[in-house]
Image (tube, grey):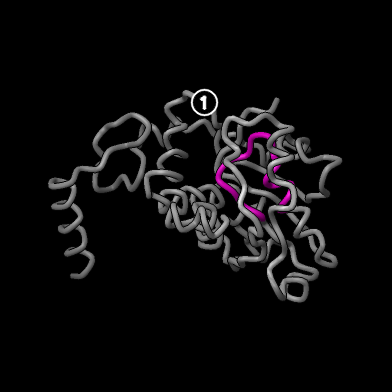
Amino acid sequence: MISTIKQWFGAALDVVLPRSCPVCGKALGSDEPWLCRRCLRELPLTHLDQVPFNAMEQLFAGKVPIERATGYFYYEKGSPYAAILHDIKYRHVPRMAQWLAARALREMPPFANGITTVVPVPLHADKLARRGYNQSEYIARGVAQATGATVVQAVKAVRSHTTQTHKGALERWQNIQGAYGLARGMEQRLAGKHVLLVDDVVTTGSTLEACAATLLDVPNITVSLFTLAVARLD
């Protein structure tokens, strides 16, 4: 009965406040949570989890010793699919990130083998106050939902930094230096664990590199990486 009432309420809400697919603009049906079926079917998946020493893993080779890395779909500036990240980050729909992350990890179950803990890339308190949420935390929730892993706020943003958007690789690296630290008590809590560090998108990898380096101060930790989207790196 409760389920039926929720369905009726959802259908009525769609009439009053119709939802639309962020990719194509088509009105969404009651069985289409965030993307229309066609755009979801044509989502440019990377399948990097199936590629040994893939392009994302190569990006971090020689910088930080990660176990494995993958991104769910390809990000290209100007692509209609870039609207997904824009909506998640700036238009107050972080639950779409949670839904996509859960879907991604269910489609690649071997990737999560051995992972016990999910750590979101943090936002500085100033930026968190302005935005109202950390999209990476919602991605972490989706991963946890699909895998049973525990979300831990293990990395903290110790200083604010300017946006990474429109910066080159060197500028991004310089901008992020000293921006992150390990939260109190994490050395004992994460020692010997396999941790999955998550973010919304990877381009140059500077943010993930800095956060992974912070986590790798923990004794006997193993770090892997997951992002919703990844720029074409090859």
Question: What crowding class fits label 1: few (fewer than 14 Cα within 10 Å), some (14-19), or many (20 or more)?
Answer: few
- The kind of residue on which mark 1 rests is Lys
Looking at the picture, how far across and down is residue 80, in whole percent? Answer: 42, 27
Q: Which residues are magenta?
A: 197-211
- Location of residue 157 with respect to 2 vertically, above or below: above
Looking at the picture, how far across and down is residue 162, in whole percent? Answer: 59, 43
Count of marks placed on residues: 1
Most foreground residue, 171 or 112: 171
Q: Is residue 112 something that shows in the picture? A: no
Residue 52 picture quarter? top right
The answer to whether residue 110 is magenta is no
Check the picture and name the quadrant holding the N terminus. bottom left
Residue at coordinates 56% horizontally, 55% vertically from top-left?
123
The residue to which callout 1 is attached is: 77
Q: Is residue 136 something that shows in the picture? A: yes
Looking at the picture, how far across and down is residue 46, in whole percent? Answer: 60, 34
Residue 173 picture quarter? top right
- Location of residue 57 with respect to 134 vertically, above or below: above
Residue at coordinates 69% horizontally, 61% vertically from top-left?
115
Is residue 161 left or right of 206 when viewed as pictured?
Answer: left
Most foreground residue, 119 or 125: 125
Most foreground residue, 133 or 34: 133
Most foreground residue, 233 or 107: 233
- Location of residue 61 with respect to 196 vertically, above or below: above
Residue 184 picture quarter? bottom right
Check the picture and name the quadrant holding the C terminus. top right
Residue at coordinates 46% horizontally, 49% vertically from top-left?
97
Q: Indicate the secondary structure of the residue bearing disc 1.
A: loop
- Location of residue 82 with respect to 149 vertically, above or below: above
Residue at coordinates 67% horizontally, 45% vertically from top-left?
207
Looking at the picture, how far across and down is residue 152, in whole percent? Answer: 61, 67
Is residue 96 left or right of 172 when viewed as pictured?
Answer: left
